[in-house]
Image: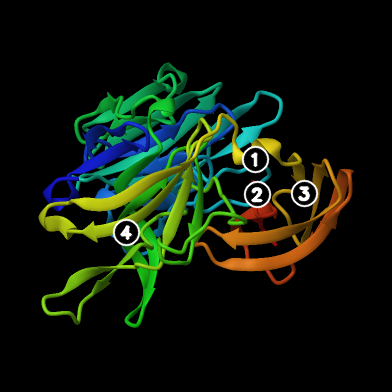
Amino acid sequence: MQPGYTNDVFYSLENGEVSAYSGSSWTVAFYNNAMSAAIMINDGRGVELFKVTDDISQFANITDTIGLSTWTQLYGTNATWRDGSAFEGETTGSPFNYGWGDYDLATKVVSGSRIFMIKTIEDAYYKVYVVKKETGIVTYRYASLDNSFDTTMVINVPDYLNKSYAYLNMDNHTLQDREPNGDEWDFVFTRYVTFVTNPQGSAYYPVVGVFSNEGVEVAEVNDIPANADYAGAPFSGARNVIGDDWKSFDPMAIPPQFVLNDSLTYYVQNQVGDIYKLYFTRFDGSSTGNVRFNKEKVASGTTSIRDNQPNLDVHTIYPNPSKGSVDLVFSSEEKEKLNLRVYSLLGKLVINSEIVANLGLNSIRLNLNDVENGVYLVQLGNDINTATHKLIVNK
């Protein structure tokens, strides 16, 4: 990654390092799917996002950062590429609200309903209004606080074919094409912000870690590499299964240093079905940005682990937003036991239960009386198959 973790490095298990891009080359990024409202911030490089007001008529009147201490700072979740981006971090409670805007069932357009403040990598402050997202095209307005600079960018995200995101650098006001094609890489070494708990307390903190590509499955096995086996291990499509858990920082060591967790082994299935065993052997820290690991191909195949499993499909969660309970409607191709888990965007598990699914269409009621208002991820599945949907609670 170079000294100071300068680069994001995209890596293929089959072909090695694919490409490296400056980690500071972008400010915000727009997900390449017309059905998602995700807008990601480059928090690992210092970008910060604040909710200012839900009165969009006040855009021109916001001329300073005096209210910064009272504005809500927004963070994303690292679970998926598709959901839980920072701009979706706090909803208004109105139907089909995605944090920055509301979805219209008739027009299929998400229209902006909130003004934000962004601090860029170069410490510039811009007020932001996401005007709309329509069939994959995002209209994004941002301006300096004195209104001397005011621009509206129209980003045709589908132009970035085979890429997860289209990227915008708000310091030099240019769009960035900075991903390899989606079928060329398995994971990226990068910096991101996560919620860290240690003896000194809990806070959001930037870390260096690994995100898996969409379509890549990872199983984490708590065993030393010599004894580890992936038989029966739960594979997941979440992007942060590897994350940064494979190391920790020991401030009491002389000198202070990173320590590897030598009892963690990962099995990674790429998009063509090959499975690799992977474990980390060294992390040099910011002095070189070098990450060392061993990999071994342990299985070949052309089908995903999930392809041979009974299909599980969540059709809907309603009402969503919810005021106290929801009905989860899903279908299964067999009678089976499933785990139902609900996570906050901070990764806190708030509901954990086991249900029995019948063959065909199923409907279960989920009691949310003890769940606080906010945005949650509902996961239904087993060790192999998991479906995830976003849930808004507003009582």
Relative vertical location of residue 237 with respect to residue 253 in this rendering, above or below: above
- The disc placed on residue 68 is 4
Residue drawn at x 67%, y 61% is 341
Marks 3/1: CA–CA distance: 29 Å
Q: Quadrant of residue 161?
A: top left
Q: Quadrant of residue 311?
A: top right
Circle 2 SS class: loop
Which residue in the protein does label 1 denote?
306
Residue type at mark 1: give it: Arg
Residue drawn at x 15%, y 57% is 286
Q: Of the residues tagged 4 and 2, which is closer to the observer?
A: 2
> How far from the left and from the top, in percent, is residue 305?
61, 41
Q: Of the residues tagged 3 and 4, which is closer to the observer?
A: 3
Residue type at mark 2: give it: Ile
Residue drawn at x 71%, y 25% is 106
Nearer the N terminus, badge 3 or badge 1?
A: 1
Nearer the N terminus, badge 4 or badge 2?
A: 4
Which residue in the protein does label 3 denote?
319
Which residue in the protein does label 2 denote?
384
Circle 1 SS class: helix
Q: Of the residues tagged 2 and 3, which is closer to the observer?
A: 2
- The disc placed on residue 133 is none
Marks 4/1: CA–CA distance: 46 Å
Residue placed most toward the observer, 220 or 94: 220
> How far from the left and from the top, in percent, is residue 148?
21, 32
Residue type at mark 4: give it: Leu
